[in-house]
Image: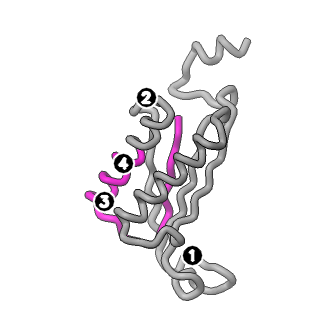
Amino acid sequence: MPTFQLTTTLPFTASQKATLAENITNIHCTLTGADRVAVQVIFRHLAPEDHYHGGLPTAAAVGTLIWVHTICKSGRTQEAKDRIMKDVLEMIAKEAGVEKRQILFYMQEIDIENTLQFFDELSLARRE
């Protein structure tokens, strides 16, 4: 289940969150063929006083940032991963009204064998 977590001090509205979630889902599914219901997008808002860079509040040190931490299954080509990151990053920059350099994107891969989603008996049986 691909998970995209966006963490920022920006106060996204409910409408912005819905648009971002829809667009992230569209990009991921178009590029991977994943089932739409499998894609989850999580928004985490940080208070400005809860985030620091180099010992200074992030806004003072480097400005407003958006972190995108993605966990997805391993096995995709580097080209496919680069395309997902580029397309999602560019879309977020446009929708959030920030520069691309204000977005940090981390993609973490996980072996599908190390997941259990919705307690899938079939995935357990395939491992035995």
- Per the image, the residue denoted by label 2 is 35
Mark positioned earlier in the residue sequence (2 or 1): 2
Gap between marks 4 and 3, in whole Å?
10 Å
- Per the image, the residue denoted by label 3 is 16
Gap between marks 1 and 3, in whole Å?
22 Å
Gap between marks 2 and 1, in whole Å?
34 Å
Query: What span is colored magenta in the figure?
Result: 1-24
Gap between marks 4 and 1, in whole Å?
27 Å
- Which amino acid type is shown beneath numbered disc 1? His
Disc number for residue 51: 1
Disc number for residue 23: 4
In the rendered image of this protein, does residue 7 appear above or below residue 53? above
What residue is drawn where x is 65% and y is 11%? 125
Q: Is residue 20 magenta?
A: yes
On the image, the x and y values in percent for residue 51 come to 57, 75
On the image, the x and y values in percent for residue 66 come to 50, 66
> Seen from this angle, which residue lies furthest front?
79
